[in-house]
């Protein structure tokens, strides 16, 4: 069954060619509590160590964030992004995981425009298969602004080397389907931190 799931997921990006499709791949290299990643989507580069992260992309000149565990299954992230258009955005995100399900609500405050936007993302993973659905809201206007669905399969090729074919489909506020994004995520890990 596992091989069948892999084959079907690998064919999903090919079937996406029937639609308007973008291709976006990403790479993460890490060891212990340190990681570096690059995502083709927006040319995003990020690095993190012990929860402290820094990032840049086509739309973000510089971003700084900090992630910590509040309780056993509850993580929280706070960040500040200085955008390329000189806007400053403060973001707060929490993530709760239990029994394969992860719920991630987040809130972004554009300080310059006094604008608030929120996203709620629900993900589920089982037997290497991951899926998610997210909903976006404009808090100021109390209106729905879009959503996105995605699926991926974590294919562990060897110890510390994981390949994940994935597919995501966005929808706008009128439920019109946007451009399908397909790609491969490559995760390379050089082992756990030796410090306790």
Image (spheres, helix red, strand yellow):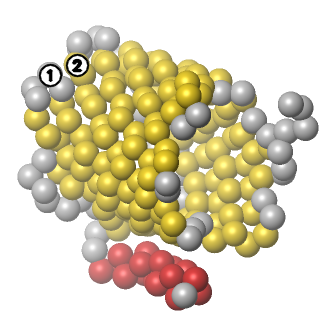
Q: Looking at the picture, does residue 2 appear above or below residue 66?
A: below
Q: Position of residue 102 (x, y in %)?
A: 44, 48
Image disc number at residue 24 = none
Check the picture and name the quadrant holding the N terminus. bottom right
Residue at 69%, 69% (x, y): give it. Answer: 156
Give the residue number, with chain letter if any, for mark 1: 140
Q: Secondary structure at mark 1?
A: loop
In 3D space, how far apart are the residues under numbered discs 2 and 1 (Cα atoms)? 7 Å
Q: Callout 1 environment at 10 Å: few (<14), some (14 to 19), or many (20+)?
A: few
Q: Is residue 3 visible?
A: yes
Give the residue number, with chain letter if any, for mark 2: 115
Q: Looking at the picture, does residue 52 appear above or below residue 136?
A: above
**Residues marked 2 and 1 touching at CB (< 8 Å):** yes
Q: Position of residue 133 (x, y in %)?
A: 32, 54
Q: Looking at the picture, does residue 67 appear above or below residue 132?
A: above
Q: Secondary structure at mark 2?
A: strand
**Residue 12 left/right relative to 143:** right
Which quarter of the figure has residue 82? Answer: top left
**Residue 102 left/right relative to 179:** right
Sequence order check, earlier mark of 2 and 1: 2
Frontmost of labels 2 and 1 is 1
In the image, 115 versus 68, the foreground residue is 68
Q: Position of residue 131 (x, y in %)?
A: 42, 62
Which quarter of the figure has residue 34? Answer: top right
């Amino acid at each position: 069954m596992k091989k069948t799931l892999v084959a079907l997921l690998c064919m999903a990006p090919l079937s996406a060619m029937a639609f308007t499709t973008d291709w976006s791949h990403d790479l993460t290299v890490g060891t212990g509590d340190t990681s570096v990643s690059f995502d083709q989507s927006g040319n995003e580069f990020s690095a993190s160590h012990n929860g402290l992260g820094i990032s840049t992309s086509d739309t973000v000149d510089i971003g700084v964030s900090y992630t910590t565990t509040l309780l056993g299954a509850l993580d929280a992230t706070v960040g500040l992004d200085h955008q390329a258009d000189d806007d400053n955005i403060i973001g707060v995100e929490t993530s709760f995981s239990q029994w394969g399900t992860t719920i991630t609500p987040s809130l972004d405050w554009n300080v310059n425009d006094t604008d608030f936007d929120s996203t709620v993302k629900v993900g589920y993973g089982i037997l290497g298969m991951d899926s998610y659905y997210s909903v976006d809201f404009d808090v100021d206007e109390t209106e729905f602004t879009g959503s996105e669905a995605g699926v991926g399969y974590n294919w562990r090729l060897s110890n510390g080397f994981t390949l994940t074919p994935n597919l995501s489909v966005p929808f706008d506020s009128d439920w019109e389907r946007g451009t399908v994004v397909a790609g491969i995520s490559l995760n390379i890990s050089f082992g756990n931190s030796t410090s306790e």
